[in-house]
Amino acid sequence: IMKRPPRKANEVIMSAKRWKSTIIYGLCITAAVIGITAYSHLVLKLSSKIINNMAFYTLVLAQLLNVFNMAERKVSFFNNEIVKNPWVWSAIVISLFITIGAYYIQPVAKALFLTNLSIAQIGWIIVFAFGSLGLSQIFKRFGYTF
């Protein structure tokens, strides 16, 4: 990237295509959060406190996974500059530790209304968060995003 010439001073930072991509990725994350909320309420019949926690963790994980949408569309999802970047992986791991740490730091957990979740509930969080990434990649592969 550093070998590329700089952009022109009058060139916009966010082109229309990039705005469209940002909106689509945001809608995919939103769909994951709304999806887990609806599923937890309508199918799993969970309490509102647990549903809120599942939505929160889905949002966090989906946001972290969103970094993988930044790779160029023309390259393989499993073999690109983002997946190969150790700093990206380090940032994800650190962010996950911070998120998990928030659960164990009682004043933070209390402020965020965090509660115990079962392994099955955590599994659903992972499914919906990765579903957001999968949906984003489908839009990307069909050329709807950058």
Image: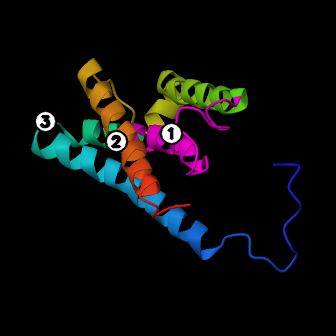
Q: Which mark is residue 131?
A: 2
Q: Callout 2: helix, strand or loop?
A: helix
- The three-letter code of the residue at mark 3 reads Leu
**Residue 104, relative to residue 57: is it above or below?**
above
Circle 3 residue:
44
Question: Residue at image x 30%, y 26%?
Answer: 123
Q: Any magenta on residue 60?
A: yes
Question: Residue at image x 32%, y 54%?
Answer: 31
How far across and down, in percent of the image, does residue 67 sit? 58, 43
Q: Which mark is residue 130?
A: none
Pointer 1 or 3: first along the chain: 3
Pointer 1 or 2: first along the chain: 1
Q: In the image, is 108 to the left or to the right of 132? A: right
Circle 1 residue:
65
Judged by depth in the image, the label closer to the viewer, 3 or 2, is: 2
Q: Are marks 1 and 2 in contact (CB under 8 Å)?
A: no
Query: Badge 1 local density, few (<14 within 10 Å), some, or many (20+)?
Result: some
